[in-house]
Image (tube, rainbow, N blue to C red):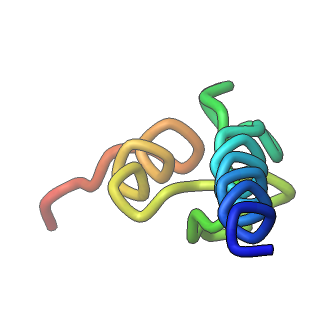
């Protein structure tokens, strides 16, 4: 029984690892997004927090000094 549980634990761990590397969607630049990632949804596009400035500059424009 103990050996069966060990095999089951190993199987479930492998399944969990395999699922986490599946691509769930793509961001605004076409980069893959994986389950568990946090993104902003802006104008039907997924944007990572690190890419917010680049996204705004490409869609709205660069900031100007007044």
Q: Residue furthest top?
A: 30
Relative to the observer, which residue lies in front, 65 or 37? 37
Residue appearing at x 76%, y 51% in the figure: 11
Residue appearing at x 86%, y 57% in the figure: 44
Please indicate whether residue 11 sits to the left or right of residue 51 in the image: right
Classify 62 as above or below 63.
above
Image coordinates for residue 61, horizontal then vertical, percent: 44, 44
Classify 39 as above or below 54.
below
Occupied quadrant, residue 8: bottom right
Quadrant position of the N terminus in the picture = bottom right
Classify 37 as above or below 63.
below
Relative to the observer, which residue lies in front, 23 or 7? 7
Relative to the observer, which residue lies in front, 28 or 64? 28
Classify 21 as above or below 19.
above
Relative to the observer, which residue lies in front, 8 or 44? 8
Image coordinates for residue 39, horizontal then vertical, percent: 59, 66
Quadrant position of the C terminus in the picture = bottom left
Residue appearing at x 22%, y 54% in the figure: 64
Image coordinates for residue 38, horizontal then vertical, percent: 57, 70
């Amino acid at each position: 029984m103990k050996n069966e549980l060990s095999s089951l634990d190993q199987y479930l761990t492998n399944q969990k690892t395999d699922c986490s590397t599946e691509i769930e969607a793509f961001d605004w630049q076409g980069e893959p997004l994986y389950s568990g990632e946090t993104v902003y949804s802006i104008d039907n596009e997924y944007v990572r927090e690190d890419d917010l400035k680049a996204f705004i500059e490409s869609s709205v424009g660069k900031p100007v000094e007044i």
